[in-house]
Image (cartoon, rainbow, N blue to C red):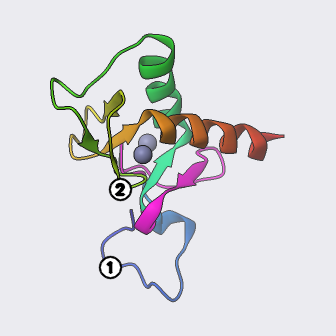
Amino acid sequence: MRRQGTDHANVAMSDVLCDFCHSEWTDSRPMIEGHLGACVCGQCLAEAYRAVILNGIDDRDGVPALDCTMCREAREEPARRSAAWPEAIICTRCITMATKALERDAQ
Ligand SMILES: [Zn+2]
Ligand SMILES: [Zn+2]
């Protein structure tokens, strides 16, 4: 997401916020961008990966498919909801793809 009042012709790193924790993009906090400016930071992504992929946690709560903040699709697969900002949801596919992108960037 973008900070409110961002000059879209001149977006600074500090204008780019993680949809899942609302932290700024910094050199030590990598950011993966999804559709329509949605972003997830490396920390939230790692947390979602641990929860969904490693521990089998599914925040769908009986709803078959939640709208993913990152890809804007309602996919019938486990998803992680942000504890701090519950409107932010990431699906299994986005967790996997974003984690791969982050690992590529880190090399
Ligand atoms: Zn975050
Ligand atoms: Zn998704």
Which corner quadrant holds the N terminus?
A: bottom left
Q: Position of residue 21 (x, y in %)?
A: 36, 43
Q: Position of residue 32 (x, y in %)?
A: 56, 51
Extreme-left residue of the structure: 62
Q: Is residue 105 one of those drawn in magenta?
A: no
Look at mark 1 in the image and give the residue it sits on: 5
Between marks 2 and 1 in the image, the one whose residue lies nearer the viewer: 2
Q: Which mark is residue 72?
A: 2
The stretch of residues the image draws in magenta is 18-37
Question: Which residue is found at the position 51% from the left and 13% from the top?
Answer: 54
Mark positioned earlier in the residue sequence (2 or 1) = 1
Which corner quadrant holds the C terminus?
A: top right
Whether the residue under disc 2 has CB within 8 Å of ligand 2: yes
The image quarter containing residue 38 is bottom left
* 47, 57: nearer the viewer: 57
Amino acid type, residue under disc 2 in the picture: Arg
Q: Name the side, left or right, on which 9 lies relative to 36.
A: right
Amino acid type, residue under disc 1 in the picture: Gly
